[in-house]
Image (cartoon, helix red, strand yellow):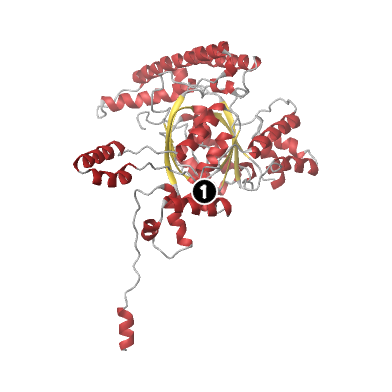
Amino acid sequence: MADAERAEEKPRPSAEVYAVYGVEPEIQAYAMAKYSRSALSLKESLREISEQKAEKFLNTFYFQYGHRSIADLAHIAFALERVSLLAAIAVVDEQRWDGQERSTRYQDFSRPDYYIPAFAGNSDAQRLFEETIELLFGEYRELSQAVFNHLCARVPRPPEMKEEAYTRTLHARAFDSARYLLPLATCTSLGQIVNARTLETQITRLLSSSFAEVRELGEKLKYAANHAAYDTAGEAKRRLYEEIGRRDPSWGEQVRELLLKEVRPAPTLVKYAEPNPYLIETGKELRAAAEQLMCGSEMAAAPPVDLLDDEPVEIELATTLLYENSHYSYRQIRERVQGLTEAERREIVDLGVRHRGKHDELPRAFCTGMKFRFDILMDIGGFRDLHRHRRCIQIGQEFTTVHGYETPEDVRAANWSDRYATAMGTMRNMIKQFISEGMDAGEEQYLIPLAYRKRTLFKMDFAEAVYITELRTAPAGHFSYRAIAWKMYEAVARRYPSLAQYFRVHDPSQPWDLLQR
């Protein structure tokens, strides 16, 4: 009995949970990775780790042994400012990405701030480009005001609503429609918090882009990871160091290293990020294969949302690889793929792995076998909101004008339809002119307004289909993605009627209060 009492008195282990602050990302990654190789606590590990130890460890385990999960433990915050919308879309196209971007729905973009391609030194082309962009920004300003005036006349302010809130809400609604005139060259800003592994793959992907601006962003991200980060308390620390130094020079020298040490976020983990020949060469060969297979066929009519049928993995894989490198619908490409021999389909799949290096992951197109696959054709503006759904697999096609454009209902209601159509037509003509004059391939895409449509293949499980449709049909959402999300729900409900009851969606055709945001 005494032994039992003594056993009861034995202290039980007590969990300890604490946050960690002020640790450099790579040292933090090393310290946490040591859990698998040491019995030390995190506090003990941090006390014994030096910058040199962390670098040596990471060089050994991350690069030589390929323990890439270590980089998941180093998180870094970045600001990317004055980048084009085109480049911003490329930056955020990561499945493991957290960040925010300046909203074209809620902010005024009337100040003409935009990216200008080099146009291979052709000054005439650059001047025409700038004149065309300035025209779009001018129309954006006037359309914003026209829609705002229309809304003010249509929607009276409720007595309980403050004038400031009323004006802000209607301005946001006006920006929501006018932003369709903004070209992809429009400058924006975004912030991201990513782990070092995502950062490495992001930099590699950006460096492999066909766009000079995107490649330059990759270089700048790599530089920012390898050089001193911005210290929000830097000035205050410097003043404190100088004050201590004036009072006691010896103490000043002792605190100098502690207070003013430069912190490089990831000098080891991203140092080998370079352009990836696998991505570059594979893209070229698949584009050529898609062109050869489709041989200039007329694009078949397709719905905005197409819930695809089940099919063998081999056919899905070959079709997806070609889809990403063309502008045809998934069904139209799949029809051609199904008509190929087994050996011919295998040749297409082989193109996707022919240049794969030792450490290259399979590209996103190889993510096959998901039950709910939607081929979606929608305007670029609305697409950018659906692009944020990272639980699903997204296979995007390039920007183009071949699918036409959307006209917001508020544009029609404000009697701006003709002027809006003229602006869109002008853009399309300018794009054709740039292409015919032999400008750098793809650079004409900077002129494309957000109103123009693009294709994206969304692959997901049932839970994600429910989440997207519920969130994106909410009344306060953007009219474009509300319509698309509703069509996604309808497509699932038609194919699987018994599952429709599990969706809590809002029919966008039903009236709603415009002052609810």
Q: Is residue 330 visible?
A: no
Depicted 130 relative to depicted 296: above or below: above
Q: Nearer the viewer, residue 179 or 183?
A: 183
Q: Nearer the viewer, residue 258 or 218?
A: 258
Image coordinates of residue 219 in percent, x first then y, are 52, 33
Depicted 296 relative to depicted 252: above or below: above
**What type is the residue that disc 1 sits on?**
Ala
Horizontally, is 160 left or right of 107 in the view?
Answer: left
Q: Secondary structure at mark 1?
A: helix
Horizontally, is 27 left or right of 438 in the view?
Answer: left
Specify the farthest residue to the bottom. 1
Residue at left 50%, top 32%? 217
Please give the residue where the numbered disc 1 appears in the rendered image. 463
Q: Nearer the viewer, residue 119 or 60?
A: 60
Crowdedness near tag 1: few (<14), some (14–19) or many (≥20) residues, C-alpha within 10 Å: few
Residue at left 73%, top 25%? 296
Q: Nearer the viewer, residue 152 or 274?
A: 274
